[in-house]
Amino acid sequence: MHRLREYLQDPFLNRLYAAVREAGPIRSISVDLVSVCNLRCQGCYFFAEDLDRHKPAREAEFDAFIEREKARGTNFVTVVGGEPSLVVPRIQKLYANFRINVATNGIIRIPYEGLENLPIGISVWGDHATDRKLRGGGRTDVFSTALRNYEGDPRAFWYYTVAPGHAHEVARVVEQCVANGNYVLFNFYGDLCGLGGDLDYRMGFAPVRKEIDRMIARHPDRILLSSYLSEVVSTGILYGERWGYDVCTSISSDHEVNRERIRNGKPYNPHFRAYNADWVSTRRCCTGNDRDCNSCFDVWEHFSWIMLNMRRHLGSKKEFTNWLTTVFLFYLINRLVNFEQGIQWLPEIHQRVSPGGWESVELRDRRCREEELQAALS
């Protein structure tokens, strides 16, 4: 690990690494809190995979689930499934026992009091017309409702899922989210309903990535996705390996279907389980049982893919920076590190990772060393 020691001579990388080490390792799960939702979004994996067939048991079973997971060593929970804001008391129970984040459609505001440090990812799938079509049944302006509910809320970040042919909407959506006082994390639309046209993931996401990079340059203190992560998620390529079930790291370790996957030697998270809304059974991975992985652009699963492939990123300081900033962003978004301090480092992270940014950092560091040498000689 001599290369790691060498890379950590960089003070900024050392600060990021120290913050992650201090926060400690993640032993994570995901859980569906409820099997119902107040929307039927066109392309939602939850209903596309019929995951609503798993019905919640009595509240006593939920309490027992929490105790089992605490005993198993779980320390981080991603709350998904149905619409969590419909069962706020269950969110509160998880919040009292674990570090958690919650994904919501934003129609019902999750209360602030008692949940002050709760990361809330609010879904948006495009500008008002697109979002109304895909998520509001052509009638409800879900985006406007969610903007009102989370205006100025320091916990909120927008989980913006962009379709391939909708790159032209990115700037408009981001500007509204930032003006609302929130942060933005991107995701990529998988077209699980087979709508095709400008929603077809097979078109590729190059124009979308270009717009994301433009938003990073415009709002480096508000965008929570790096250019590196954007490329890995949208292309499904990591060191020549193609994204798919055989390399996915977010698989339920106790699920029978994953036995052969676990034996293939590819990294995976041995603690992780994706629990259905009965709080006992698990599914193959975060986003379903039978889903074609070619349509999976889930940013959380790709975070894990990068994070568990640290050794591959040790070939150069640039590669290590790509890995470390990805890990730090995951910890930052989920408030596993000090959020107020970490968010101040966000512009520097983007400068290090964005196209052309690394060269400018290297030139700056070289200039500083030259100035220090001249000062020492004078």
Image (spheres, rainbow, N blue to C red):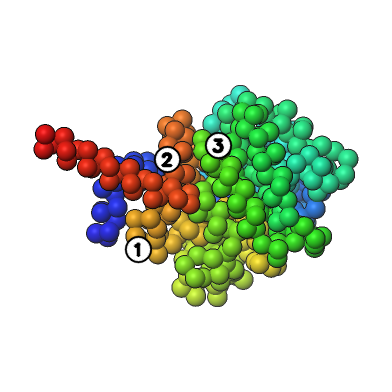
SS for dot 2: helix
Question: Vertically, is 265 above or below 47?
Answer: below
Q: Quadrant for the N terminus, please.
A: bottom left
Asked whether residue 114 appears in the rendered view, the answer is yes
Identify the residue at horizontal 47%, vertical 67% (top origin).
239
SS for dot 1: loop
Expressed as whole percent of the image width and height from the top left, the position of residue 161 reads 68, 49
The residue that disc 1 covers is: 315
Label 1 – label 2 distance at C-alpha = 22 Å
Label 3 – label 2 distance at C-alpha = 12 Å
Q: Residues within 10 Å of mark 1 (few under 14, many from 20)?
A: few
Q: Type of residue at label 3?
A: His
Q: Is 8 in front, or is 363? A: 363
The residue that disc 3 covers is: 219
Label 3 – label 1 distance at C-alpha = 30 Å
Check residue 348 in the rendering and tell me which mark sits there, or answer none: 2
Q: Residues within 10 Å of mark 2 (few under 14, many from 20)?
A: some
User: Among all residues in the image, which is located at the extreme left?
Assistant: 377
Question: Vertically, is 144 above or below 291?
Answer: above
Q: Type of residue at label 2?
A: Glu
Expressed as whole percent of the image width and height from the top left, the position of residue 126 reads 73, 45
Question: Vertically, is 77 above or below 219?
Answer: below
Considering only order in the chain, which callout, 2 or 3, is on the residue closer to the N terminus? 3
Identify the residue at horizontal 56%, vertical 47% (top origin).
213
Q: Are marks 3 and 2 in contact (CB under 8 Å)?
A: no
